[in-house]
Amino acid sequence: MIKGIFPVEKFSPLETPFYYYDMDLLRETLDTIRKETENKPFHIHYAIKANHNPRILKEIASYGFGADCVSGNEILKALACGFSPETIAFAGVGKTDREMNIGLDHDIFCFNVESKPEVKILNGLAAAKGKTARVALRINPNVDAHTHHYITTGLNENKFGINQQDLPEILEIIAESANIKLIGIHFHIGSQITDLSAFEDLCVKAAELQEWFNEKGIRLPVINVGGGLGINYQHPNHCPIADFESYFRLFEKYLKLQEDQSLHFELGRSVVAPCGSLIARTVFVKEGLQKKFLIVDAGMTDLIRPALYQAFHHIENISSDGEYTPYDVVGPICESSDVFAKEMMLNRAERGDLIAIRSAGAYGEAMASQYNCRPLPASHFSDSL
């Protein structure tokens, strides 16, 4: 079994648990995205929700990519870390007046609106400021992303987005809203999508909807297909970078853009997940009747994905070259769901061994909590240790 390369000697004196980010891998990922999208009318908005660590955000912003935000504070964080307001898209089913005003005050690129009431409220807020809000309609294409139901977002009965039968009424509201400018349509069908055929289905639906708007004399300069590209959690060492080539080629093939039209993507997990690992220390190795428990000092407060929706993360004992032994890797939190993996094959462990929980750069540090009065995990970076 191939193991990742970690500077274990530099980790030893550090307080665990902490997040470790391989900045070389992040840059290689960003270089790949730039290569696959250059000389095309493609625009990337990094999904801040995946990881809002300032060091990560500044690196991504330095490539000239935009930001996909789902809260007012994310907009402010993006601006503080170098993202230009004209590249910021603001999504979210429950934007507050305060949050919409933040977007208006900074003249962001676009609001991805998700309901009839939102259009009306945004128009009123924009009018009060003497501004015009650019909007894209987030439409539910009713495409099954074939992923976990917690992270499927494009079906008719999801809380997100506008159902197609409501579009005529939405257009009437926009026509009566002097401070709203419709610039595009927006979709997001889910997260951790590894079956690319789901994106083919999205392209077909987007083309149908675009024709519907064309028939009404409405030209849309922006098509936003959201994000959702998955990564290989099982084999982070063999497949450290998502298949961006196939992903972008698919949209180029199946979604024919019209003249002066741009295609926008909101990638998050695929950008940052592979470069991050949660580093924990073995507290105890506990012998059960039929299994062994490897108890570490990280828990669901530091990485909630396995407890929240049974997500898989490859795990390595980076302190040992001993024979492989099956362990249930668990944390110290007072919850039975505080389990990272069951029957995970790891090099034989002893108290004090360092454990790397891989592909944790997305929805790891960003979702950490202080349940049980635990401190938030620190973060360290490969180019500054």
Image: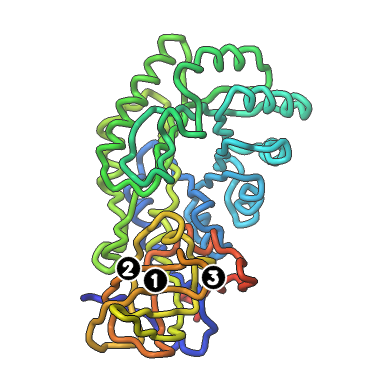
Q: Nearer the viewer, residue 55 or 365?
A: 365
Residue 384 in view in this figure: no
Where residue 210 sits, quadrant-wise, is top left
Q: Say what amino acid the circle numbered 2 marks.
A: His
Residue 206 in view in this figure: yes
**Which label's residue is closer to the chain start, 1 or 2?**
2
Residue 60: percent from left, percent from top: 49, 57
Residue 74: percent from left, percent from top: 61, 50
Label 1 sits on a secondary structure element that is strand
Q: Pointer 1: what residue?
A: 357
The image's colouring method is rainbow
Q: Which residue is drawn at 51% across and 58% down?
A: 51
What is the number of the mark on residue 38?
none
The relative height of residue 314 versus residue 41 in the rendered view (above or below) is: below
Q: Pointer 2: what residue?
A: 314
The relative height of residue 200 versus residue 78 in the rendered view (above or below) is: above
Where residue 295 sits, quadrant-wise, is bottom left
Residue 361: percent from left, percent from top: 44, 63
Q: Say what amino acid the circle numbered 3 marks.
A: Cys
Relative placement, left or right, of 366 versus 263 is right
Q: Which of 27 and 232 is in front in this view?
A: 232
